[in-house]
């Protein structure tokens, strides 16, 4: 599917493993923190806690949502503990900054991550100023993607017209509610082995390569 930038006035991006390559390893560090938190929270051996964490992720959208549904935990402590990771492996990306600057219209981040984590990542990449807003897990009232209500709240908050918006995301199921609202959907990466249905309009191995032809600013 070809995207006509003249028909788009809002560009929406997932954060982790979308605005930067998965190979830079940030989510691996976060996952390590999540595993450690799970062991402490549920009192199971590490291997059993990891299985339960995957179950929570599949059933509830995030580990936090699963923990909150089944255990008495402090969500603020969870968000602080698991996202407070070093970002040394995350590389500044001036080419992405230039391409984003050349996209016509508004730009937003829609992430299941914590607000402070999003701020740190955008600052590290060097693209903070390119975004008109960030909608993080706190803004979702801790109800993560792919809950349809979260997408409705997002478009209402920023007065987005869905059929003039495009959403970039690395997790296939998180694109389905956006498509249902009328957004154009683009999967970044291989989908992590998950089902890729007809709610995905386009696929791209690399975000920057996909965006470059759509930008009105030379990023060479």
Image (cartoon, grey):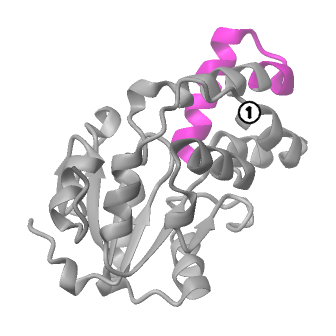
Residue 17: percent from the left, percent from the top?
Answer: 43, 40
* Residue stretch in magenta: 38-59
Residue 210: percent from the left, percent from the top?
Answer: 20, 53
Q: Is residue 61 visible?
A: no
Number of labels in the image equals 1
Placement of 163 over or under 202, stated as above or below: below
Q: Which one is in front, 206 or 75?
A: 206
Placement of 174 over or under 153, stated as above or below: above
Q: Which one is in front, 82 or 108?
A: 108
Disc 1, SS = helix
Q: Please report the residue visible at 9 percent of the width from the left and 68 percent of the height from the top.
A: 2
Image quadrant of residue 217?
A: bottom left
Q: Which one is in front, 114 or 214?
A: 214
Secondary structure predominantly adopted by residues drawn in magenta: helix
Placement of 4 over or under 200, stated as above or below: below
Membership of 97 in magenta stretch: no
Q: Which one is in front, 151 or 42?
A: 151
Q: Please report the residue visible at 25 percent of the width from the left and 54 percent of the height from the top.
A: 219
Left/right placement of residue 171 relative to residue 28 reads: left
Q: Is residue 42 visible?
A: yes
Residue where numbered disc 1 is placed:
82
Placement of 171 over or under 28, stated as above or below: below
Left/right placement of residue 20 relative to residue 113 reads: left
Q: Please report the residue visible at 62 percent of the width from the left and 38 percent of the height from the top.
A: 56
Membership of 46 in magenta stretch: yes
């Amino acid at each position: 599917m070809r995207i006509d930038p003249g028909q788009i006035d809002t560009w929406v991006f997932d954060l982790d493993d979308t605005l930067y390559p998965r190979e830079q390893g940030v989510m691996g560090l976060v996952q390590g923190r999540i595993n450690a938190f799970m062991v402490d929270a549920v009192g199971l051996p590490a291997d059993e806690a990891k299985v339960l964490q995957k179950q929570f992720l599949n059933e509830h959208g995030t580990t936090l949502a699963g923990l909150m549904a089944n255990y008495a935990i402090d969500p603020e402590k969870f968000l602080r503990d698991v996202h407070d990771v070093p970002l040394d492996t995350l590389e500044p990306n001036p080419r992405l900054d230039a391409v984003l600057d050349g996209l016509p219209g508004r730009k937003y981040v829609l992430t299941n991550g914590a607000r402070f984590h999003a701020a740190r990542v955008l600052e590290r990449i060097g693209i903070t100023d390119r975004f008109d807003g960030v909608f993080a897990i706190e803004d979702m009232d801790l109800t993560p993607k792919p809950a349809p209500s979260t997408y409705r709240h997002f478009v209402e908050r920023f007065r987005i017209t869905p059929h003039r918006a495009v959403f970039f995301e690395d997790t296939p199921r998180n694109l389905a509610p956006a498509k249902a609202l009328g957004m154009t959907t683009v999967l970044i990466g291989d989908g992590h082995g998950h089902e890729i249905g007809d709610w995905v309009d386009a696929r791209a191995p690399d975000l920057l390569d996909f965006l470059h032809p759509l930008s009105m600013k030379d990023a060479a």
